[in-house]
Image (cartoon, grey):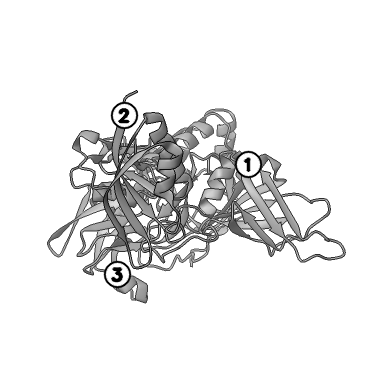
Amino acid sequence: MKKFKVKKTIKEINEKIKEGRAVVVTAEEMIEIVEKNGDVEAARKIDVVTTGTFGPMCSSGAFLNFGHTSPRIRASKVWLNDVPAYGGVAAVDCYIGATEVVEGDPLNSVYPGEFNYGGGHVIEDLVAGNVIKLRAEGYGTDCYPARKYERNITINDLRDAVLFNPRNAYQNYNCAVNLSDTTIYTYMGMLRPRMANAAYATSGQLSPLFNDPFYRTIGIGTRIFLGGTQGFVAWPGTQHNPNVPRGTNGVPKQGAGTIAVVGNLKEMNPEWLAAASILGYGVSLYVGIGIPIPILDEEMARQTAVKDEDIYTQVYDYSMDYPKGVTNPLAEVSYKDLRSGAIIIDGKKIITAPLSSYYKARQIANILKEWIEGGKFILGEPQQTLPIA
Amino acid sequence: MAMYSKKIVIRYTPDIVQQPVIYQLVKQYDLIFNILKARIFPRREGVIVLELSGLKENFDRGIRFLKEMGLKVEPLSKSVSQNINKCVHCGACTAFCSTLALSFEKPSQKVLFDPEKCNGCELCVSACPVRAMEINLL
């Protein structure tokens, strides 16, 4: 066991939150505090550091239960505004995935496809309170005789609506470029030929898992900001992989940890869940997530003070290497470089732009800070932290 | 009443190409048309550039009719704008803006659009994942 000069528990911090005495700062503010005071003093002063991220997270969706009909139906096929939802759950349960495209969409047959409507848009429309056309088909059973059901609904008509995203808030992500001679259309956006631009997708120093690189405080049951309300980390995210090269500060230099998150869709807000139509690729969903990190000791203080210049990612070619599954990084760059608007690879200046919103990530970290300061948000003690090996 | 006149671009999809759309503009909305350019592409998508004239009210109704038919209608000269209600300020557009009309405001990291600098290339319209960059028709 490591010996720490400062030792606090989540329980103690929660007592302070309830009494309105907790000292909360954002991950950006923490950088200066640790630089000025050192990690031990910062750990004594600060109780919670808030983080935030707002980016397209494809592995998202919602479980919906639209209530039993009369006569009853075993809805084996379900559509919401003509976007297919997965009906192989129970009678009137379904799962609408963020990347499902509306039926009849020309997809990429007219290249590059526009992907104007899909699951992400259904979810955004639901949280915005818009009317959705629900259509269901069943095969008819003795207990569920109805074969067809159609109704215009809003989220208020749903019995239950639960956002459940299997993989969100990736701890680091690739930076994408295009080495070929033609423009390509990827989930990282439009990439112009001969490395004319580079796309990246995390909020760097504000991003949740960069601030707790070894998941000491994040796990199943961690309470989070999700889509504008309070949600939870439900499980390690799919593809969670802690075993990647890390810097001396412990921060992964490529995609690593992920989280599965869950929350009540009925409490969410379209400001923090926004549909995305990515040209030539498909539909996705911007998800706003913020995680509070309890400063249990000086190690957590040091880790939450991580800066863009100390966080690195790999640059990959998305024209040949990535689609083939070849892992051949062209360069390693820092988030400070990426956020400066240009990186240099092989002497060539390449314009960079993010897909995630730093502006919104900062807003989320600030909202979470206000919630905790106001005693409206109590830290969730993880029942089990995310796997570290 | 003053006549209103505007050059527009209409894009057809194969399913509509058989229908007498222009005829309806004349018959139903009393509009005068002058075809400047027309082309049908191999997969039967088509594009027509025409000048459309008539009463402003009829012109607007005619454009609405075209859109309801499922046609894409754009002005020949376009102006681009940023829909503030939709923009999430990710900045994906900034990599494609050669005139720097789109940029990050420091230190807020908000995406700002300066229409004065915009040359109407529309690359931002394609690059925006939330469709916040819009082409204005009228």
Among the two numbered marks 3 and 1 on one chain, the one whose residue lies closer to the N terminus: 1
Q: Does the rendering let one see residue A80?
A: yes
The residue tagged 1 is A266
Of A1 and B54, which appears nearest the observer? Answer: B54
Neighbor class of circle 2 (other Cα within 10 Å; few <14, some 14-19, many 20+) is few
Where is residue A60 drawn, in percent x and y? 53, 56
Where is residue B40 drawn, in percent x and y? 33, 61
Of A131 and B129, which appears nearest the observer? Answer: A131
Residue A131 is labelled as none
Residue drawn at 32 percent across, 43 percent down: B33
Q: What residue type is labelled 1?
A: Lys
Distance Cα–Cα, label 3 vs label 2 = 52 Å
Distance Cα–Cα, label 3 vs label 1 = 40 Å
A78 lies above or below A274: below
Distance Cα–Cα, label 2 vs label 1 = 51 Å
A104 relative position to A324: left or right: right
Same subunit, tags 3 and 1: yes
Marks 2 and 1: CB-CB under 8 Å?
A: no
Q: Which amino acid does label 2 sit on?
A: Met
Same subunit, tags 3 and 2: no
Q: Which residue lies furthest to the left in this view?
A: A347
Of A108 and A208, which appears nearest the observer? Answer: A108
Disc 1 secondary structure class: helix
Q: Nearer the viewer, mark 2 or mark 1?
A: 2
Q: Which residue lies furthest to the front in this view?
A: B27
B58 relative position to B112: left or right: right
Disc 3 secondary structure class: loop
- Number of marks in picture: 3
The residue tagged 3 is A319
Residue drawn at 41 percent across, 30 percent down: B57
Disc 2: host chain = B
